[in-house]
Amino acid sequence: MQNLDKTCRIAVCVKQVPEIGEARINPETGTLERSGVPLTINPLDVAALQIARLIKEEVGGEMVAFSMGPISSERVLRDAIAWGCQRGYLISDPRLAASDTYATSYILSKTLQKFGPWDIIVFGERAIDGDTGQVGPEVAAFLNLPVFSYVTEVAVEKETFSIKRMIERGWQIIKVRPPFVLTVSRGKSVVRLPTLKDKIRAHEMPIVKLDATALGIATSRVGLEGSPTWVQKVEKVQVTRKGTVLRDQSPKTMALAFKKFLEERGLL
C-alpha cells in the first residue's frame, strides 16, 4: 500500500485461553486441558484489537479476525467482532490438535495467504497459556514480512506508520510502510469496551469455519506429527527453602545476622 487511502486491510489473530490461574496440563499428553476450564480471549489480544481498531478508524479499510482452536473458539471471534472486526474465521480441525508454535504459525500463514493480501497483521505479544511469544514472528517469517514486537503505540503519518515499541533500554520509534506484522504489548491507552450495539452485531454475525482440507494443508505438517517440538514430561516442582527465621529481635540483631550469613558464603 503506497498511500494511506482508505484501503488498509488489517488481520488480527486472536486466541482462546484458560482464565488466569485456571490453566491445567495433561501430564500424559503434555497438552492443555480445556474441558471444564473457564475460557476467555487472550488478554494481550485485546490490546492487539485496540491498536488495530485505532488504525482502522484513522485510515479506513477493513479489519478481519482469525482464530485457531476448538469450536468453542467461536466465542473469541465474536469478541473480536464486537471490538471492531467485520468478519471472523475459525480454523478448527481435530487433525490440527497438538500443533506446536511452528505448526500453528504455518497453519495461520496459509490461512492469511488464502484471504490476503494484508497491509497489517496484528497479534498479541504472547498467549498467557503457552507464554512463548513465538507465533507472531514465525508467521511473519513464513510470509516473508518484517515484524515489530513489543509494540505499545502506532501513529499514522502521511504515508507511513510510526511504531513505538519497548526495547531493553527504553523505547524505539520506527517509521515504516506496509505490509508488516505487529505483536502488541499492553500500552497506556484505555481499552474502549464494546457497546451493546457492537455485541448484538457480533452475536448475529456468522463465523466462517475452515479445516485443513479447505486450507490445502498437508496434515503431515501439522498436529503432533508435524510439530518439531513437543512436551516430553510435566512435573510439579516442589520448592523448599531451608534457613533461619529471626522473629521478635531488634533490627540491629537481624542486620548483624544477615551480614554474618553473607560473609560465611563469601558474598561480602
Image (cartoon, rainbow, N blue to C red):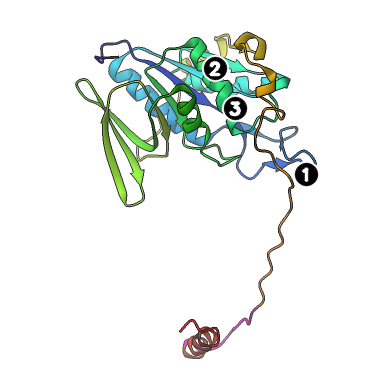
Q: Residue at x 59, y 84 (%)?
A: 246
Span colored in magenta: 243-251
Q: Earlier in the sequence, mark 3 or mark 2?
A: 3
Q: Is residue 236 above or below residue 88?
A: below
Residue at which label 2 appears: 110
* Image location (x, y in percent) of residue 136: 48, 31
In front of the other: label 2 or label 1?
2
The span from disc 3 to disc 1 (Cα, nearest Å) is: 22 Å
Which corner quadrant holds the N terminus?
A: top left
* Image location (x, y in percent) of residue 139: 49, 27
Q: Residue at x 50, y 31 (%)?
A: 138
Q: Residues within 10 Å of mark 1 (few under 14, many from 20)?
A: some
Assess whether residue 250 is covered by the magenta stretch: yes
Q: Earlier in the sequence, mark 2 or mark 1?
A: 1
Q: Is residue 47 above or below residue 208?
A: below
To which quarter of the image does residue 211 belong? top right
Which residue type does callout 1 highlight?
Pro
Residue at which label 3 appears: 104
Which residue type does callout 2 highlight?
Lys
- In the picture, the disc for residue 27 is 1
Q: Are marks 2 and 1 in contact (CB under 8 Å)?
A: no
Helix, strand or loop at label 3? It is: helix
The span from disc 2 to disc 1 (Cα, nearest Å) is: 31 Å
